[in-house]
Every structure is written in C-alpha cells, then in structure tokens.
Image (spheres, rainbow, N blue to C red):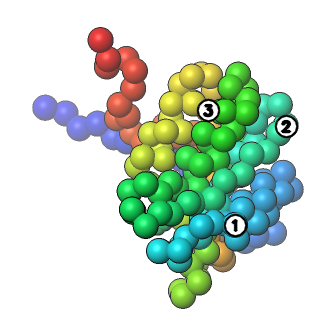
Amino acid sequence: MKTLKLESEVLVYEDRDEIPEDIMRLLVQAEDAATRAYAKYSNFQVGAAILLNNGEVVTGSNQENAVYPCGLCAERTAAFAASSRFPEVPFHTIVVTAINPVSPLTQPVSPCGSCRQALYEYEQKFNQPIEVVLSGQSGPVYRFRCVADLLPYTFHAGFLP
Ligand code: THU
C-alpha cells in the first residue's frame, strides 16, 4: 500500500492591487457578465470571461429555468459560446466571479464539478493549460495554473473504447 499525494499550486492575490492588469481587465468583464445573469430562482449571479489565444474575450452568465436542471452555469455558457464561435482557438484563461445579493461573497466562487469537467475537455482538445482565476465580490482572488489542478483523477476520453 502507498499514499499518493495530490499537489496543486494556487496563486493567491490577497489584495486587488496585486492583480496584474490583463487579469483585472478580464475580471471586470466577468463582473459585468454577472450582472447579465438570468438567475431568477437562485438570485446567485455568476459571470465568466474567457480569453482565447487569438485575443478575443467571450463572456457568459448563468441562465436559469423554471425546470431547474435546464439551467446552465456561467462557465459552461461562456465555454460553449467561445467554442461555437472559435472552434479552433484554444482557451487561454477563464475568470469567474459571482454576486450574492443577500450576503456578498468574501471568498472566491468555486466552479461546480460539471463545469470543471467541461473546461477540462477544451484543455485536452488543444493540449494547452487553461488558467483559472476565481474571485468573489471582495477578498482574495485565486489563480490556478490549469483546469486539471481543479479536477484530479479526471475522467477523460482515454477511458472510452
Ligand atoms: N453557478 C454558476 O453559474 N457557476 C458556478 O460556479 C456555481 C453555480 C450557478 C448555477 C445556478 O444558476 C446558480 O449559480 C446557483 O447554483
């Protein structure tokens, strides 16, 4: 028997002043996208901004539905839009943030498992790490090197027949 250690590094910006300009620009776009969420049922507004290798930025917000499972998270809304518009262009960075109108988020939002899996697909497709930056309404901002760091022991196409 042995123990496997899972190690992933996350850069933590403790203060907004520390955030590099290019990331800050994306964060502002993600914040703006969050205000366009259709979050009628949860009131939790999420925004995502994806920077592509060609310099384009595609944003998305969560879109809810009276039939709850029909809704989609901001990350996948943005990822699917980006891949639909630019199917051959790798994702460079995704920035995600959220607005809780009742109790403002003081910690970074955490993408759900399905979004991690969906983003991982594009990381694999282009064999290029996608940086993931997570923010709340205040407090620290986390910067992960790649999606795989957020989803160890990932299911991938290699398992399929
Ligand atoms: N949501 C996202 O859009 N992204 C996340 O990272 C977490 C959750 C959405 C789904 C749903 O519309 C609402 O937030 C509450 O779960």
SS at mark 1? loop
Which amino acid, by three-letter code, is at mark 1?
Answer: Arg
The x, y position of residue 72, in whole percent, is 50, 54
Dot 1 or dot 3, earlier in sequence? 1
> Dot 3: within a 10 Å radius of its alpha carbon, few (fewer than 14), some, or many (20 or more) residues?
many
The quarter holding residue 125 reads top right
Say left or right for 52 vs 72: right
SS at mark 3? loop
Is the Cβ of the residue at disc 3 closer than 8 Å to that at disc 2?
Answer: no
Which amino acid, by three-letter code, is at mark 3?
Answer: Pro
For discs 1 and 3, the disc positioned in front in the rendered view: 1
Q: Which residue is mark 3?
A: 129
**Residue 55 - label:** 2
The x, y position of residue 47, in whole percent, is 65, 61
Q: Residue furthest left?
A: 1
The answer to whether residue 11 is visible is no
Q: Which residue is mark 1?
A: 36
| 112 shown above or below 104 | above
Q: Residue at x 63, y 26 (%)?
A: 128
SS at mark 2? loop
**Residue 123 - label:** none
Is the Cβ of the residue at disc 1 closer than 8 Å to that at disc 2?
Answer: no
Say left or right for 77 vs 18: left
